[in-house]
Amino acid sequence: MIIDVHAHWGPWFFTMDVAGASLATMDRYGIGKAIVSATEAVIYDAQAGNRALAKVLEGQDRLYGYVTVNPRRLREAAEDLRDLTGPWVGVKIHTDYTGSPVTSPRMRAALELAAEAGRPALVHTWGPSVLDLAQVCLDIPGLRVIAGHMGADGYRYAIEAANGCDRLYLEPCWSHAPAGRIAEVVAAVDDRRLLFGTDATLIDPSSAFGAVAAAGLTGATAERVAWRNAAELFAI
């Protein structure tokens, strides 16, 4: 079993839509379940995209949804978190597309909504922003956050962040694959807080699979990264 905690549904505004969140693509890579956000919700209109994704999630049991939250539209975010239940197991927040840094008051308010809803939040992180996310997580009781891309080129900051906050999880997808990156993180972080994500439809899953395979994970650690941690975090 593999659970992909960072996937998308819908087209992008450029040509990297290479592996749609379809069951055929999932079958090709052995992905049993995926948690997806609507591309429309992430880059354009959160509420409209969430509603479009709701129709896709009906009547199947392999895709779960992130309620995409725009920190600049908190009233609509609260409505969606109230109305979208069932297969909606998490919250997705993109800091860059919404112009909402992790340290901004509006981002804190959005993460407070996620904590109140009892849903883990997948947050876009890059560089040292993962340290800011860890601090906000510590400041908000009950909040659980996933550092999307585990800081990308700031993955050593992600190690520090995860070791300083036991409610912060790391997810590795990135359009680059520096040698030894994932192995270094796995060696330094509690493996109960490591997840697997691909960033499909933006990036073909083969990228994440290759990077994780290069880390040579085995035994309980490989199982936790592949699916067990995600199943426990999202209760699926």
Image (cartoon, grey):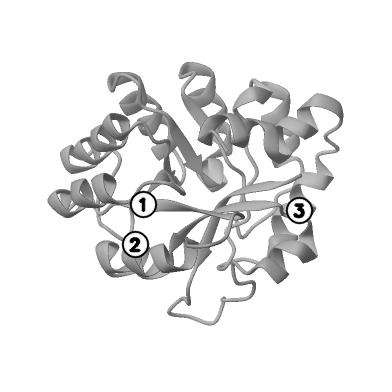
Where, by quadrant of the figure, is residue 15 drawn?
A: bottom right
Q: Residue furthest left?
A: 75
Q: Quadrant of the N terminus?
A: top right
* Of marks 2 and 3, the one in the foreground: 2
Q: Amino acid at mark 2?
A: Asn
Q: Is residue 93 visible?
A: no
Judged left or right of residue 109, residue 54 is right
Residue 120 image point, x, y percent = 42, 36
Q: Amino acid at mark 3?
A: Phe
Cα–Cα gap, marks 1 and 3: 26 Å
Q: Secondary structure at mark 3?
A: helix
In the image, what residue occupies the spot 35% across and 21% down? 142
Q: Secondary structure at mark 2?
A: helix
In the rendered structure, which disc, 1 or 3, sits on the residue that comes first in sequence? 1
Q: Where is mark 3, residue-wise?
A: 209
Where, by quadrant of the figure, is residue 13 drawn?
A: bottom left
Q: Residues within 10 Å of mark 3 (few under 14, many from 20)?
A: some
Q: Where is mark 2, residue-wise?
A: 50
For the residues labelled 1 and 2, say whether their Cβ atoms are less than 8 Å apart: yes
